Image (spheres, coloured by chain):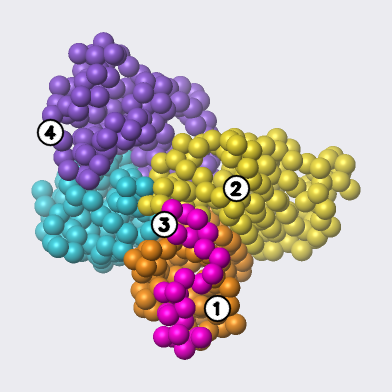
Chain colours: A yellow, B orange, C purple, D cyan
Amino acid sequence: MDSGLRHTTRFRVRFNETDPLGIVWHGHYITYFEDGREAFGETFGISYRHIRENGFLAPVVKCTCEYKSPLRHGDWATVETIFINHPAAKMIFLYSIVNSKNQVVATGETIQVFTDLGGDLILTNPPFFSDWKTQQGLL
Amino acid sequence: MDSGLRHTTRFRVRFNETDPLGIVWHGHYITYFEDGREAFGETFGISYRHIRENGFLAPVVKCTCEYKSPLRHGDWATVETIFINHPAAKMIFLYSIVNSKNQVVATGETIQVFTDLGGDLILTNPPFFSDWKTQQGLL
Amino acid sequence: MDSGLRHTTRFRVRFNETDPLGIVWHGHYITYFEDGREAFGETFGISYRHIRENGFLAPVVKCTCEYKSPLRHGDWATVETIFINHPAAKMIFLYSIVNSKNQVVATGETIQVFTDLGGDLILTNPPFFSDWKTQQGLL
Amino acid sequence: MDSGLRHTTRFRVRFNETDPLGIVWHGHYITYFEDGREAFGETFGISYRHIRENGFLAPVVKCTCEYKSPLRHGDWATVETIFINHPAAKMIFLYSIVNSKNQVVATGETIQVFTDLGGDLILTNPPFFSDWKTQQGLL
């Protein structure tokens, strides 16, 4: 369920992100999603750094990307990152990458779980995460 | 439907593929999948190069990766690439990455479509692809 | 000889640019240099795109980087790019990467030559490049 | 001074290492050098892992690359890594990348220093490194 929490960040395609077809290599969109997620996290206090300071890690356990239209070297684009509110001990984000003509060029999703600093999976919501949800009006 | 066509290729995790947690950053698995797909393609005559020589491109339109367990710097692993036979003008591959203890650490899928060399989508199977399927006993 | 032409561009260190030591992997500075060079090129009309529109390519034939101090995930830094005026048919840039405490963390140099669009080396200054130098007061 | 210690490792150019010109982007050679250095290190017992197990880190403080000729997607090449014996507390390596036609396509150098695990510079040769040199007949 869309939490209503969203953040948009702008980026520019680097030369070395494009392939011999002159377009962004498909794997680099995973980087753009992470850029979006980290920018979201810094705005809302839920970045890798915040999670770690609370004694947890949040590894990505699934990611998906769908490609609609290419991006090229020098293109400006935005990634919109949307937090999906879910009762399980997970963080789910949706992404939408939009080019400078306002066309959606790619969409995606990541799912993260929580582990302790030793990498062991945490099956219930960490207190800091429940607190964060409460602060955001999501609980 | 599993075509029965599969290929396994071995790789080693590079130092610069690992992140501050000491594990492979999740986006790099897309590279491992491509390594597997290209090794499959060279074995079965359906690599990027073969496709291009026939006057087509095969951009990835969707990719998915699920992460089960981490890989670390210096680890040896294999990627098994399986061609899924599908009637539409698409190439679908499944991937399974297995560590040196024979544990599946990640699985994934890519879907490619065909375009002409100008990037326009081709909605019917290119003749070279139908021929290839026939040769492989898939048509 | 320092041309007096310089440009400063700001960037932020991505999570996937850092290594298991928690610092930026040394090879990624080559990307930061290119970011600086392209930002310089767009400001002064001498980017990859401008060069190509004039019928030339400008491959890097040498690069050097010296590392003074690490950068970490989330750090903001700037790259200053300085054009070195040289009579030969070359483009020479110096780079200085400075962290948010105003410390120089890395310096570097790249040398580019000119080729035609087929990749053949051009030994004399392309007319567009001499014109550009004249416009910039360097000839 | 060339120590006589050298190692050659073979690699294949990945699709996502090539740029819109169809050639390997110049920054990726730093990865090939590291591949060579790590393969050397595993053969001679002086890899990142060995150094760390002895309580030290060996960050790169300078790297240089000179480009002679391009590599393309699918090309096989080798990187030869040569250890340069030097009295200071440094590790110096030279690299030579050779294509399948036995042409040198790039050369380079890296210089590493030693730090403790906290990142503080070590100005004298760590005992493990002197021992290693003795074992290799370099002291």
The residue where tag 4 is placed is C123
Residue type at mark 2 is Val
The residue where tag 2 is placed is A105
Q: How far apart are marks 1 and 3 (CA)?
A: 24 Å
Alpha-carbon neighbours of circle 2 within 10 Å: few (<14), some, or many (≥20)?
A: some
Q: Which of marks 1 and 3 is nearer the N terminus?
A: 1
Q: Give the chain letter at badge 4.
A: C
Q: Give the chain letter at badge 1.
A: B
Element under disc 4: loop
Q: Residue at x 55, y 80 (%)?
A: B85
Q: Residue B84 carries which label?
A: 1
Specify whether residue B126 is painted magenta: yes
Element under disc 3: loop
Residue type at mark 1 is Ile
Residue bounds of the magenta highlight = B115-139
Alpha-carbon neighbours of circle 3 within 10 Å: few (<14), some, or many (≥20)?
A: some
From the viewer's perspective, is residue C61 above or below residue B54?
Answer: above
Could you tell me residue D15's position as x and y percent?
38, 59
CB-based contact (under 8 Å), mark 4 and mark 3? no
Element under disc 1: strand
From the viewer's perspective, is residue A112 above or below residue B38?
Answer: above
The residue where tag 3 is placed is B117
Q: Nearer the viewer, residue C91 or D112?
A: C91
Specify whether residue D62 is painted magenta: no
Q: Do labels 1 and 3 share a chain?
A: yes
Q: Distance between the residues labelled 1 and 4?
A: 52 Å
Q: Nearer the viewer, residue A66 or C109?
A: A66
Labels 2, 3: front one = 3
Q: Distance between the residues labelled 4 and 3?
A: 34 Å
